[in-house]
Image (tube, rainbow, N blue to C red):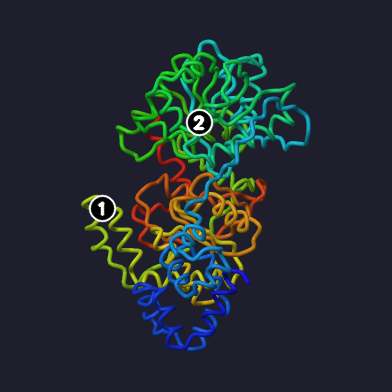
């Protein structure tokens, strides 16, 4: 008998009163208050339904894990886990002690022409050519940011740029350094480059994720590394860092708005004295704070975007613009990409909380207490009841849905409230172990369940073309965070996604980011 079956068997043997107490304890005071909004109490039939239909082993809330383990006898614990100590079993179930010893494969020689690769779309070709023209110019000395919306193919376009640059400018000698802020993004970029080279490359190239142990002074090719690792090497002034500086011919900074972080700016500025830097981002700024923008502009001097120039070259503009631009004409890049099927059309829906307390939340914000605001929102029973009802609706519509929660505890609360309704969902947070996170995400991509709830994890480094609904419960004070959240559902049919995507947004979206075109152009004024 497995862990989940043993739990269900144990629960069925309990009295109704004990079952009620058990489910009530799991839901907690906040969860019960949500159900109490409409008198949706835990009657006997609902309790039985929960026990019959719930796999408690997928709920990783530490409180729940300890609660369900406490039901098992010593013999049952020994039979299921080979141990009786609840502390050790907890670590095993929650995978807190999980160690991923899998060593990243170093592709010492990556051969070309192994499989078909889909070529760039027209606007991507134009971005590529504009970037390469500047990178290869002996006169142009500024670093470049490529500004493209989430879902429009930044990474793919950049891989074409890198391979062309390596073959033509580097003459297959030296080093290209790719930087990103998370291991997931590094892994994705590494795999994307390897796939691209097999169709676009000529001959062979070394490609690897950086490791101190595996670094060779004779390395010749592309290497992938986190900003954190580069910063650490810079502070220690390690021999490998100096070697990389000496060999580097081009630096790529993914999510380039992170370059504004002071601890990461210094090593990149040092490298840029010798090598050009190419930044990639959907939002060329971090906070809208002028000081922060100034720090980014100290590294980058030129932005290449899907702008009027790109539109003119693609004949996206009306015929009357064939000879000259009209200053009164407003070009909307997101709308144009939606018209091309590159991006999905967002079907926006605002959830209005009848008992919403804007004055209370605004007062919290005025003292810059964003986390306190999120905590209050996550505990609001009326708000959570509205979210629950709408989640049930989208589940019944069979929409593949990603939910952005206010906090880790809020994510688990929503999962447990859905559990009460007999709806299976999964939760991913920063505390979710790597292997378990990978499994949860893979099953979501395969549509094995409908609702994936997360907090602060899946805004970047996550791509699931089957997403049909983005549900934002997290009030956002950042245009970057909000842009990243809606970006999870922006992939259109031309990019393997959907023609439309439902965007459900609770009305206390703090800064009221209404329009995806406005969001994309938010930082333009700082780069004029």
Which residue occupies 47% across, 72% down? 68
Among numbered discs 2 and 1, the one appearing first in the sequence = 2
Residue nearer the viewer, 232 or 525: 232
Circle 1 crowding by C-alpha within 10 Å: few under 14, some 14–19, many from 20: few
Q: Where is residue 480 in the image (x, y as percent from the top left)?
A: 42, 44
Q: Where is residue 200 in the image (x, y as percent from the top left)?
A: 72, 28
Q: Name the residue tied to disc 1.
A: 369
Which numbered tag is attached to residue 179? 2
Q: Where is residue 439 in the image (x, y as percent from the top left)?
A: 60, 55
Please, is residue 77 above or below residue 104 in the view? below
> What distance separates the C-alpha of mark 2 from that of mark 1?
32 Å
Foreground label between 2 and 1 = 2
Please, is residue 260 above or below residue 132 in the view? below
Q: Where is residue 36 in the image (x, y as percent from the top left)?
A: 37, 81
Circle 2 crowding by C-alpha within 10 Å: few under 14, some 14–19, many from 20: many
* Local secondary structure at mark 2: strand
* Local secondary structure at mark 1: loop
Query: Which residue is situated farthest in the top direction here?
Result: 138
Would residue 52 appear left or right of 242 to someone viewing this image?
right
Q: Quadrant of residue 446?
A: bottom right
Would residue 311 appear left or right of 27 to someone viewing this image?
right
Asked if the residue at tag 1 contacts the one at tag 2, i.e. Cβ–Cβ closer than 8 Å, the answer is: no
Q: In which quarter of the image is residue 175?
A: top right
Which numbered tag is attached to residue 341? none
Residue nearer the viewer, 89 or 206: 89
Q: How many labels does the image show?
A: 2
Residue nearer the viewer, 21 or 270: 21
């Amino acid at each position: 008998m497995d862990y989940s079956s043993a739990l269900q068997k144990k629960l069925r043997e309990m009295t109704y009163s004990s079952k009620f107490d058990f489910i009530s304890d799991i839901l907690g005071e906040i969860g019960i208050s949500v159900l109490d909004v409409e008198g949706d109490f835990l009657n006997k039939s609902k309790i039985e339904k929960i026990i019959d239909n719930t796999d408690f082993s997928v709920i990783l809330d530490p409180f729940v894990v300890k609660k369900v383990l406490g039901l098992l006898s010593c013999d049952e614990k020994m039979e299921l886990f080979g141990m009786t100590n609840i502390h050790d079993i907890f670590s095993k179930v929650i995978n807190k002690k999980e160690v991923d010893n899998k060593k990243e494969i170093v592709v010492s020689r990556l051969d070309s022409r192994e499989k078909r690769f889909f070529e760039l779309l027209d606007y991507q070709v134009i971005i590529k050519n504009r970037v390469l023209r500047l990178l290869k110019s002996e006169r142009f000395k500024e670093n470049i940011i490529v500004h493209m919306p989430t879902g429009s193919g930044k990474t793919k376009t950049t891989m074409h740029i890198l391979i062309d640059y390596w073959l033509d400018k580097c003459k297959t000698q030296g080093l290209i350094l790719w930087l990103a802020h998370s291991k997931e993004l590094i892994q994705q970029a590494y795999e994307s480059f390897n796939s691209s080279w097999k169709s676009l490359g000529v001959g062979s190239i070394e490609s690897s994720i950086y490791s101190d142990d595996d670094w060779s002074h004779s390395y010749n090719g592309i290497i992938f590394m986190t900003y954190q690792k580069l910063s650490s090497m810079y502070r220690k002034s390690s021999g490998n860092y100096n070697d990389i500086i000496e060999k580097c011919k081009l630096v790529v900074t993914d999510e380039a708005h992170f370059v504004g972080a002071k601890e990461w700016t210094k090593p990149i500025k040092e490298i840029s004295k010798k090598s050009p830097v190419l930044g990639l981002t959907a939002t060329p700024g971090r906070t809208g704070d002028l000081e922060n923008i100034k720090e980014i502009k100290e590294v980058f001097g030129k932005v290449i975007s899907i702008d009027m120039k790109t539109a003119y070259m693609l004949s996206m503009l009306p015929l009357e613009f064939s000879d000259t631009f009209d200053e009164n004409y407003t070009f909307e890049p997101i709308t144009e990409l939606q018209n091309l099927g590159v991006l999905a059309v967002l079907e926006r829906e605002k959830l209005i909380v009848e008992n919403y307390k804007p004055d209370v939340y605004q007062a919290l914000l005025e003292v810059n207490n964003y986390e306190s605001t999120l905590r209050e929102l996550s505990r609001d029973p009326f708000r959570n009841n509205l979210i629950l009802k709408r989640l049930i609706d989208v589940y019944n519509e069979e929409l593949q849905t990603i939910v952005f929660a206010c906090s880790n505890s809020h994510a688990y609360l929503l999962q447990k409230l859905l559990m009460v309704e007999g709806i299976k969902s999964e939760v991913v947070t920063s505390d979710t172990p790597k292997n378990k996170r990978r499994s949860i995400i893979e099953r979501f991509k395969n549509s094995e369940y409908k609702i994936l709830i997360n907090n602060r994890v899946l805004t970047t480094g996550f791509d699931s073309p089957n997403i049909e609904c983005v549900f934002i419960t997290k009030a956002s004070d950042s245009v970057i965070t909000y842009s990243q959240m809606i970006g999870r559902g922006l992939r259109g049919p031309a990019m393997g996604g959907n023609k439309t995507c439902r965007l459900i947004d609770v009305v206390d979206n703090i800064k009221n980011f209404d329009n995806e075109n406005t969001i994309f152009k938010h930082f333009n004024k700082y780069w004029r």
